[in-house]
Structure formats: structure tokens, C-alpha cells
Amino acid sequence: MTTTQEELLPGTRRALAHRIAVAQAEGRAPSLVAAVVRGGRAVWHGARTSVDGHGPDENVQYRIGSITKTFTAVLVLRLRDEGLIDLGDPLEKHLPGTGAGEATIADLLAHTAGLAAETPAPWWERTPGSLRPELSDVLGEDPLLHPVGRRHHYSNPGYTLLGALVEELRGARWEEVLRREVLEPLGLDRTTAQPQAPHAGGWAVHPWADALLPEPLEDLGRMAPAGQLWSTTGDLARFAAFLATGDARVLSAESVREMRTPAAPAEVADVMDGAAYGLGLQIQHRDGRLLVGHSGSLPGFLANLTLSVEDDVAAVVLANCTSGPVLGAMGADLVRIVAEAEPRIPEPWRPLREVDPTVLELAGQWYWGTHAFALRVTSDGLLSLGPLSGVGRRARFRANGDGTWTGLEGYYAGEQLRPVRRPDGSLSHLDLGSFVFTRQPYDAEAAVPGGVDPRGWRGIG
């Protein structure tokens, strides 16, 4: 892929180059490559290397570790969208006999299945996958460490089970299904289960000396759906664009939005860090923006994909060292540099194509008790409810076609908003999940629960 770098301002490009240069030097990475995505395509590519001569470009493969999990999650969501599974199905329904069948498919995607973080010894990332030919070898005799669904506990074996589920329902190997259903449609020709030249070698850097040790390269076997893939910044840039908008050939925008939505209870430390987990995607609140993506590591390699949907900016960073540069922070910094230096230009405001008088009548100021709210009719045909104080519950609502509306997010997600009319047809109040919203605070003419004191508002005397 040939990237066009002219779209970013020279100052922005220099700031990006400086950030990766500092990371490579201070992190002592043999090589580091990065890309920035905006408007659905790569607009910048950078590389730093300790080797003289031609450095790695956007076509050089690095191992991406657990970013593989996001690809596996896409395959599972495709099964759901085709009606072959429900995310609430217990694994046992489709893949019996694992010993972890009580967990649902959603639990596995969100790492809430209660499974161990790793396989039984020896460490699976540095030993041949042939040591674990069966699922029982991956899970061990007692796979559950925690009650199912109660806490987020990252589990590599959990994604092995999801890969096995894909194989069971598709009747083909995981990597074959991935290539056919995701990689080929998205044009990710340089993303493979096995390394293909040109690719980087994996290194360990001595913690107390500037010396290198080659890391072993293992085929992960059964554990492949958790971390096997090799890819490039070029391919991962395209994948990041897909995670922002979806692609009808692979997964809809609605389904990728579902992947980006928190799906797991957070640990106390995660709450403090502003971190959460969706369906195959990590979520973090950092520098005032919501970031989604995934990190990855295997002996000899580090990887990170970070996306800010609101800013329309994504970053990919790959390095060939076991430890060193903190790529999660670096990915967030690359996004921040572009988002702050060249903020997204919003689409032009456009009015509604048609105005429904019965809908327009709902717009304006409403009161829930003494709390003041504004209800707006937006150009996308939705209703938007928010507190006038700026603090409190807010949500958008989708029309149901029968005069009622359904909440799309937050406290009111799934709740019904129903306009209530008087016998003469005039609008009386709004009923939102039993909450009565009136045009005046505690309107005596509306059906306010508990009634309204007939003496009305008064002073303290």
C-alpha cells in the first residue's frame, strides 16, 4: 500500500516522527513502525530502526499477538448476525464437553467466563502448540477460577474456545475461515497465520545491557485464535478503518459498534484507570477521549491498534522486542497529536428533509419533577433528550412507527417514551418508563404520580 503523507501538515508529521523516534530510542527497540489513519485510510507512515540502510515499511510483517483476538471476535459476530448463534447461548449448546460450557459466548468474548488467564504449564507462548493438541490440554482439569459472568478476567484459553466454535460451525480451520470471511474481503493480503517475507525477527533486549537475544518462533496450534497472526501497519490501518465504520461484506456498522461497547464488569483498578472491555476490543478513556482497539505481545514482538471514532483518527504501532516501548501509551499519543493539531472538521449541518408536526410538537423544554430537560428533533430522525444543566441522564430515541420511541443508550436504553394526549388530542405529557415529563414543573393538569398539592407553589412564610 502506498500512503499519502501530504494530507497531514508538516508540523503534525514532525511531531509524529519525533514521538516514534523517542519511543524507539528510549524503549531500545530493534525496530518500530507506525501508521496513522484518518478518513478511512492511512495518511502517515513512520519507522525507526537500529539497522543501517533501508528501514521497515508498511509492508513488513510483525507478529501482532492478541490483536488476533479482535479478528476472532469478528468471526463470532458474523455467526451471530447470520442467526447461527446467539451471544447469550451457553458454549455447551454448540461446543459440548469442554468443561467451560456454562459460560456464554458473550462471556468468552468479554473475558467474563471465569477461565484462567493462561493454559497449564509450560508457558504456551514459548512452546510448540503440538504440546496442546486438544481443548482439554488448553483448559486443564479445572478451567474455571471465578464464577461465570461476575468479573472481567482476561483469558487466552477463552479465545481458543471461540476459535474452536468457529471451526465447529463453519466446518473449516480457523485460519481458513478468517482468510475467506475477513482478510480477503478487506484486502488484508499481508495478514497471515505464518510469517511471510519480508518480516521482522523477534528479539529480547537485555534489561541491563544493550545486547540482543533471538526469541523462539512457535506455531501456537490450538491457541492460534488468541494470538497467532502476523500483519503489517498497512493491513492494520485498513482493519482500523473497518472497526470504525464496518463493511457490509464482513460486519455491519451496528455490529462493530456493539464490539466497541463495554460488555464486562470492570475491576476497581480498571475503573480508576478508565479502562473497560467490549466484545474483542479494549476500551479506555484517556486524555479526554474514548479510545478503542487492542494491544498484543508475544516473545519478540509488541503491537497496538488504537482508534478514536469521534476524532476519526487511528494509530497502529508495531515493534520487534519482548519488552521496552509502551505501545498503548504511544498509540494514544499518536491519535492525540493528530486530533489536537488537526481537529476533525464536522459535516455541514443540514435540516430535516421532512417535518412531522406531531413529532415537532414534542420538541422543547420538559420537566421531570423539578429537573429541566430539553427534547430536540435531530436531522437523523431521532429525538435527543438531555438535562439543561448539562449534568444528568441523557439519551437518544428511535421512532417505533406507532407514535412511541425507544431509548438507545444510557439509563433509558430500551425504555419506551410515549407521548400522552388529552381527550381533545392536545399533548398532555410524556411517559418515559413511568417517569412523567411535563411542560411545567409538577403540572397540576398532568398525571403526575402522587398528585400535586392543590395549593400550588408557595413561599416559606
Image (tube, helix red, strand yellow):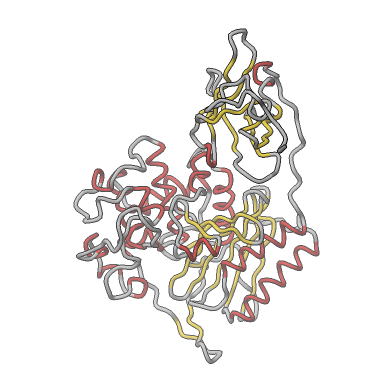
- What is the number of callouts on the image? 0
Q: Is any part of residue 329 visible from this angle?
A: yes
**Picture coordinates of residue 287 (x, y %)?**
66, 61
**Picture coordinates of residue 1 (x, y %)?**
62, 56
Residue shown at 25%/66% (left/top)? Answer: 132
Report the side of 342 relative to 242 (left or right).
right
Q: Is residue 84 above or below residue 399?
A: below
Report the side of 189 relative to 338 (left or right).
left
Q: Is any part of residue 378 visible from this angle?
A: no
Q: Is residue 70 above or below residue 401?
A: below
Q: Quadrant of residue 27?
A: bottom right
Q: In which quarter of the image is residue 332?
A: bottom right
Residue shown at 61%/33% (left/top)? Answer: 368
Residue shown at 69%/21% (left/top)? Answer: 360
Q: Split into 4 quadrants, where in the image is the C terminus?
A: top right
**Picture coordinates of residue 63 (x, y %)?**
47, 67
Asked whether 20 or 182 is in front, the reply is: 20
